[in-house]
Image (spheres, rainbow, N blue to C red):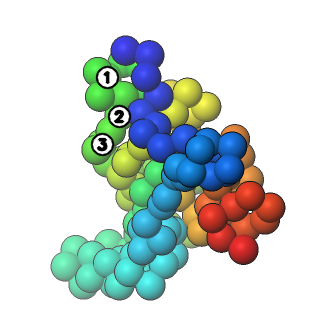
Amino acid sequence: GGQTGYYCPPDPAVASGGDAAFACMDWTFSSTALLAAEASFLNRTGDSVYLGVGTYGTSSDPQRGLGACFRLTVDGVDRDIIAQSVNTGHDVAGNQFDLQIGAGGAGAFNTCAGGRGSMFP
């Protein structure tokens, strides 16, 4: 239904009674772990791509896109991105992929971005 898929509130811990949303930094675009996975993928397939995770919202799927993988061709990017949707959200509409980028959180749900009220300094 209408659930966005957020199990932890995106608000700072004080405002949400102590809970906070967390993200696995090893999954962050261009992290050491994903760079190693990209090299392994290239070695196995001969295909040079970027790997990532993020959010893709769609109402055409009962799971709202969770777990789905997408190969993205983006203007101005030197190679395709293969990304898996690991979250949903009402702020991400169909045909849009919100890629997880460390210290990127310049959006509605930015608890991982540094600053006042953030889990990171």
Q: How many marks?
A: 3
The amino acid pointed to by label 1 is Asp
Can the viewer see residue 114 in this picture?
yes
Location of mark 1 (residue): 61
Q: Earlier in the sequence, mark 3 or mark 1?
A: 1
Q: Give residue 7's quadrant in the image.
A: top left
The amino acid pointed to by label 2 is Gly
Q: Position of residue 5 (x, y in %)?
A: 42, 33
Lateral position of residue 89 relative to residue 36, left or right: right
Q: Position of residue 43 (x, y in %)?
A: 24, 84
Q: Contact, CB < 8 Å: mark 3 with mark 2?
A: yes
Q: Residue at x 35, y 34 (%)?
A: 65
Q: Which mark is residue 90?
A: none
Lateral position of residue 9 relative to residue 105, left or right: left
Q: Which mark is residue 68?
A: 3
Q: Residue at x 72, y 74 (%)?
A: 121
The foreground one among 34 and 90 is 90
Q: Contact, CB < 8 Å: mark 1 with mark 2?
A: yes
Location of mark 2 (residue): 65
The foreground one among 23 and 93 is 23
Q: Secondary structure at mark 2?
A: loop
Q: Position of residue 11 (x, y in %)?
A: 65, 44
Lateral position of residue 108 relative to residue 19, left or right: right
Please, which residue is most extreme toward the top here?
Answer: 1
Please, which residue is most extreme toward the front here?
Answer: 17
Question: Which quarter of the rendered picture does the N terminus lie within?
Answer: top left
Q: Indicate whether 87 appears above or below 71.
A: above
Q: Contact, CB < 8 Å: mark 3 with mark 1?
A: yes
Mark 1–mark 2 distance (CA, rounded to whole Å): 6 Å
Mark 3–mark 2 distance (CA, rounded to whole Å): 6 Å
The amino acid pointed to by label 3 is Ala
